[in-house]
Image: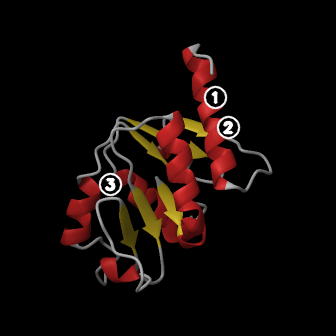
């Protein structure tokens, strides 16, 4: 799941909802951030991408590139609203998931499914909308 730095505060809530509803084998967050907080460790669960991860030409450095290319999970959910300098597109292009889900504020061509969440700004509520939509498409009930 791709999120912005200001969305980081709701990661625990998002994680809880996703684990109970989607029941993923593995869950990982990519956080677009200006700085990595000192009290948060980067791990396989949470990876921070910041300006220092790019070289002078704006290309992702090898170590961060390898980490992102290893994220080849089934579904990639883009909740980020950051479209500055096409960073969102750049990160989404590195993720080799089989199904990419975005929203109407990001580049629709980079995603297999694009939802318009309307005025809803809460990330957990957006995930609930996504979950209901996927259930509806699959014919499942819950």
Q: Which residue is mark 2?
A: 129
Badge 3 is on which residue?
A: 94
- Location of residue 75 in the rendering, given as x and y in whole percent from the top left corner: 41, 39
The C terminus, quarter of image: top right
Q: Of the numbered discs in the image, which one, if any, rests on residue 133? A: 1
Q: Secondary structure at mark 2?
A: helix
Mark 3 or 2: the one toward you: 2
C-alpha span from label 3 to label 2: 26 Å
In the image, taking residue 75 as reference, residue 78 lies left or right, namely right
Q: Nearer the viewer, residue 121 or 141?
A: 141
Which tag, 3 or 1, sits closer to the chain's start?
Answer: 3
**Taking 89 as reference, is 55 left or right?**
left
**Circle 3 Cα neighbour tier, 10 Å, few/some/many (<14 / 14–19 / ≥20):** some
Residue 68 showing in the rendered view: yes
Query: Marks 1 and 2: in contact by CB < 8 Å?
Result: yes
Residue 104's place in the image compared with 35, above or below, is above
Q: Residue at x 35, y 35 (%)?
A: 98
Residue at x 19% of width, y 70% of height: 62
Question: Which mark identifies residue 66?
Answer: none
Farthest-out residue, top: 139
Question: Mark 3 against mark 1, which lies toward the viewer?
Answer: 1
Between disc 3 and disc 2, whose residue precedes? 3
Q: What residue appears at the point 63 percent right and 20 percent down from the top-left corner? A: 136
Measured in 3D between alpha carbons, the distance from the residue under mark 3 to the one under mark 1, in whole angstroms, is 26 Å
> Is residue 134 toward the left or the right of residue 41 in the image?
right
């Amino acid at each position: 799941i791709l999120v912005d730095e200001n969305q980081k505060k709701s990661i625990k809530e998002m994680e809880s909802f996703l684990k109970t509803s989607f029941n993923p084998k593995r869950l990982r967050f990519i956080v677009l951030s200006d700085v990595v907080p000192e009290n948060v460790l980067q791990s396989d669960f949470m990876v921070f991408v910041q300006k220092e991860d790019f070289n002078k030409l704006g290309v992702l450095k090898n170590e961060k590139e390898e980490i992102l290319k290893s994220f080849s999970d089934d579904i990639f959910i883009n909740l980020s609203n950051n479209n500055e300098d096409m960073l969102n597109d750049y990160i989404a292009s590195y993720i080799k998931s089989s199904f990419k889900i975005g929203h109407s504020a990001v580049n629709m061509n980079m995603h297999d499914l694009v939802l318009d969440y309307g005025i809803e700004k809460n990330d957990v509520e957006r995930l609930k909308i996504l979950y209901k939509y996927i259930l509806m498409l699959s014919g499942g009930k819950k």
